[in-house]
Amino acid sequence: MPSEQAKKKIVAYKTLPDDVMSYLSAHAEVKTIDPTNHEALTAALKAADGAIGASIKITPDMLEGAQRLKVLSTISVGYDNFDVDDLTRRGILLTHTPDVLTESTADTVFALILATARRVVELAEWVKAGNWQSSIGEACFGVDVQGKTLGIVGLGRIGGAVARRAALGFRMNVLYTNRHPNAQAENDYGAKRVELDELLAKSDFVCLQVPLTEATRGMIGAAQLRAMKKTAILINASRGPTVDEPALIEALKNGTILGAGLDVFEKEPLPADSPLLAMKNVVALPHIGSATHETRHAMSRNAAENLIGALQGTLDVNIVNPQVLGR
Ligand code: 8YV
């Protein structure tokens, strides 16, 4: 254990599990900051060697004068809360938690597929409201999931785990777009790589699994929604801004598509007056992608180990900008 004097200074801008706090405290001096206190966080970053947290934007101006800062460790796979080029210029390493959340996030995607197709949330509310008075008829029918075509936009780790569930569990045909072919998904799940136009035209479920970048922002707009089947369902558990939300609202109102299962939104928390909340054909979740006790714990642990490893110079995985290390 390092002496108090040699201990690095860490800022935790998210509440961490006790064992993760103990682990960090054994290696560093940890200061916990309420992330809603922007000034306190900015000031703490100026005095820190590293920081760990999630869910808030760390902007370049927050890092002005943070001369000691060497590592930012995000408790998430996505890193759209950071300006990576700016971090690289400043020589600050960014680490993330890509592997530990793959399966639970894929479960969330499948929960949305099943919930929208079978109208689980709408009908459960209908039952709770005392409406189930006789054997149900067509008015309560949904659409099949098994055997249908699933189009996955972006077949990375989570997309691959969704493809596995779809092909092996639900005998679905899997189409996908990706910058590179995914040989495992093609061999093991019969996934077929196509252009986005073909995916949109042929899929019964269109599932977004891309990170948010300048290239993916707004990639599903009015034209793409029109290109989908009228019977298709859009699933988004990636990042809200990949979809043009006003265009989606129009498409859902007009019957351009059948429904949407959404875990992410342009603005989070989703404003209470969002038209999406009044739509029966929408299942809206509060960004629960990775939110299980087990996975969130594993993410915190993983991020803490990333941070300490990076500060000690021993980390060689989970690094977003390895250029900082000259790699
Ligand atoms: C959460 C996520 O947003 O990992 C991601 O990219 O979207 C999530 O798991 C959150 O940052 C977890 O703390």
Image: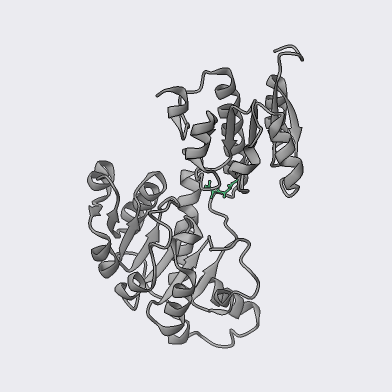
Q: Count the marks: how many? A: 0
Q: Quadrant of residue 51?
A: top right
Residue drawn 22% across the image and 44% down it: 187
Residue at figure coordinates x 38%, y 54% from the top left:
215
On the image, the x and y values in percent for residue 14 come to 69, 42
Q: Nearer the viewer, residue 241 or 20?
A: 241
Q: Which part of the image, by quadrant, shows the N terminus?
A: top right
**Residue 10 appears in the picture as rendered:** yes
Note whether 126 is above or below 118 in the view shown: below
In terms of depth relative to the viewer, which is nearer, 168 or 155?
155
How far from the left and from the top, in percent, is residue 327?
A: 40, 24
**For residue 76, what is the image quadrant?**
top right
User: Does residue 15 appear to the left or right of 210 in the view shown?
Assistant: right
Left or right of 311 in this view: 8? right
Classify residue 48 by image quadrant: top right
Q: In this view, does 223 lie above or below 54?
A: below
Q: 8 and 150: which one is in front?
A: 8
- Left or right: 195, with 86 as reference point: left
Q: In this view, does 299 lie above or below 255?
A: above
Give the image location of residue 97, x and y in percent. Answer: 52, 37
Q: Answer yes or no: is residue 137 visible.
A: no
- Where residue 247 appears, as percent x and y from the top left, is 44, 74
Indicate whether 206 appears above or below 297. below
Seen in the image, is 267 located left or right of residue 140? right
Colouring scheme, one of rainbow, by chain, secondary structure, one colour: one colour
Q: Which residue occupies 63% across, 28% down?
A: 69
